Image: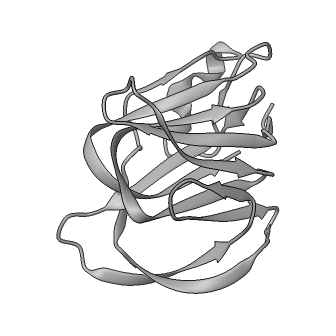
């Protein structure tokens, strides 16, 4: 049952897991969506809020590694994001992407979300537990219950980090 892709979703952060602030609203999600933050967002909790039922195969939250050397990365920027901070979004659906390409410098990044504590508003099946969205496998997924009108899932990073990129694989 892969593929419950929302038409829109919101990325939020919280310093305490209670007081959530919107970071970006993303429209037209499919395949995967990668959102970069410049400057980085200082947070411990990150939440994805969908506007309808949704499923996430993998959620990666990349942060700067303290003391890491600088590397170069390319980003594809698209107008499908409502900017709340300086945000660029990359979208891919079956091998294609939209937007214009620009080069930007970034430091080495680590997936801060992998195997971290998670919580969700609902789940569709017992085999689609929210922990599967951070298990480093795109063969599994978290899926919200069909009747959940504004499903969300959050990750506790177990520490405060500078988050530079969030990638959602639908």
x, y percent for residue 48: 58, 36
Quadrant showing the C terminus: top right
38 to the left or right of 29: left
Residue at the location (31% across, 35% down)? 15
11, 74: nearer the viewer = 11
Whether 163 is drawn above or below 2: the answer is below
Whether residue 142 is visible here, answered yes or no, is yes
Name of the residue lying farthest toward the left: 67
Residue at the location (75% across, 54% down)? 31
Name of the residue lying farthest toward the front: 84
83 to the left or right of 163: right
Whether residue 141 is visible here, answered yes or no, is no
x, y percent for residue 83: 61, 57
Whether 117 is drawn above or below 166: the answer is above
Whether 30 is drawn above or below 7: the answer is below
Residue at the location (79% across, 13% down)? 147
- Quadrant of the rendered image containing residue 71: bottom left
Whether 68 is drawn above or below 13: the answer is below
Residue at the location (37% across, 26% down)? 17
163, 136: nearer the viewer = 163
């Amino acid at each position: 049952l892969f593929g419950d892709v929302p038409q829109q979703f919101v990325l939020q952060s919280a310093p305490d897991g209670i007081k959530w602030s919107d970071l970006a609203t993303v429209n037209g999600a499919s395949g995967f969506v990668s959102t970069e933050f410049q400057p980085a967002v200082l947070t411990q909790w990150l939440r994805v809020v969908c506007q309808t039922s949704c499923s996430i195969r993998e959620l990666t939250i990349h942060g700067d590694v303290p003391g890491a050397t600088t590397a170069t990365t390319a980003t594809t920027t698209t107008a499908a994001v409502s900017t709340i901070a300086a945000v660029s979004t990359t979208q891919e659906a079956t091998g294609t992407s939209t937007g214009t390409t620009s080069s930007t410098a970034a430091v080495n990044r680590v997936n801060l979300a992998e195997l971290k504590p998670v919580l969700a508003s609902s789940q569709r099946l017992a085999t689609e537990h929210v922990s599967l969205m951070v298990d480093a496998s795109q063969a599994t997924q978290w899926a919200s219950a069909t009747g959940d009108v504004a499903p969300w899932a959050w990750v506790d990073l177990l520490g405060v980090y500078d988050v530079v990129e969030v990638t959602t694989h639908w």
